[in-house]
Image: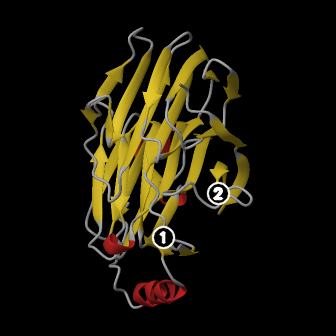
Amino acid sequence: MNRTIYNILPAQKVNMGGIILDQPLPLGSIQQIDPFLLLHHWESGIDGGQLQRDLGVGPHPHRGFSPVTFIFKGGVHHRDSMGNNEVIYAGGTQWMNSGKGVIHSERPDKELAQNGGDFELIQLWINTPAEFKLLPAEYHSLTGEDTPQVTSPDGKVSVGVVSGIFKGVKGPIPAYSQLTALRIDLRKGGKMNFPFPSEFNTFIYQLDGSLTINEATETKARDLIWFNNEEGNIKVEAKADTRAILLAGKPIDEALSTYGPFVMNSQREIMNAIKDYQQGKMGELVEEF
């Protein structure tokens, strides 16, 4: 039995502070695929001859969810008010549980700013259950070399397990709800089955290439393929070399209240988050270049 497709969401172009991104989630009336709140795909060339301070996203706060960055090209320099200061390169992941509050910045690395080159990442927002929203913030990083891999029987599909468990392989990064986060590289002709519990909301986001899902539906670059909650495998075949991510998670099923960089359960909690940020309770980040 195959797990059938519920919907295909083609990403839309959005302008985030002058940065043009592909965004398939949220989209129209679809505000989340619980617990996944947002997906941004940023791909651009960096011209070089620039200052790092003029690129990327400067210091800003978060509370109540996990911002997660998958790096595909170039390097991302993460700094935060907990004292973390690190560059992670292509193939790696940066995962921050923002908890009760943190300030961070994300910029292309200094070498890329100076010399130019390709830059590509995906950022996800993953909701945190109410009972964990006000825990201290945490930052986790994972290089491409240290990401556990699962290979398809035909040797043409490689799956990096970032968080959760896939085919008996456990991802190193912890999450506050039941979920699995995978990075998938497929060579043309590669095939693989992806089994997940029927109660897990599950989708694939396709960066490029061409896939056939369940031997029937062809999908293209920048598609988000959202599956029905039912028993069965997701069968994937690459019609061309393809990069994708797969997210599967048990719904948190709680009230949702959001405002900019804060994700809470009520408007009162949002107001408290704004007040705490304004009063400096989420720390301070002074970038040094």
Judge the density around disc 1: few (<14), some (14-19), many (≥20) Cα neighbours within 10 Å.
some
List x then y, in percent, for residue 56: 53, 56
Residue located beneath label 1 in the image: 254
Above or below residue 279? Residue 205 is above
Q: How far across and down, in percent of the image, does residue 156 sit? A: 45, 12
Q: Give the quadrant of residue 196.
A: top left
Is residue 119 rendered to the left or right of residue 25? left
Amino acid type assigned to the residue bearing label 1 in the image: Glu
* Closest to the observer, 271 or 279: 271
Q: Residue at x 53, y 32 (%)?
A: 244
Q: Nearer the viewer, residue 87 or 142?
A: 142
**Circles 2, 1 touching at the beta carbon (< 8 Å):** no
Q: Residue at x 34, y 35 (%)?
A: 161
Task: Tell me which residue sits at (44%, 84%) in the image.
Answer: 273
For the point 59% across and 42% down, the residue is 228
| x then y, percent, for residue 142 | 29, 42
Q: Nearer the viewer, mark 2 or mark 1?
A: 1
Pointer 2: what residue?
26
**The residue tagged with tag 2: helix, strand or loop?**
loop
Compared to residue 64, the image places residue 201 above or below, namely above
Where residue 90 sits, quadrant-wise, is top left
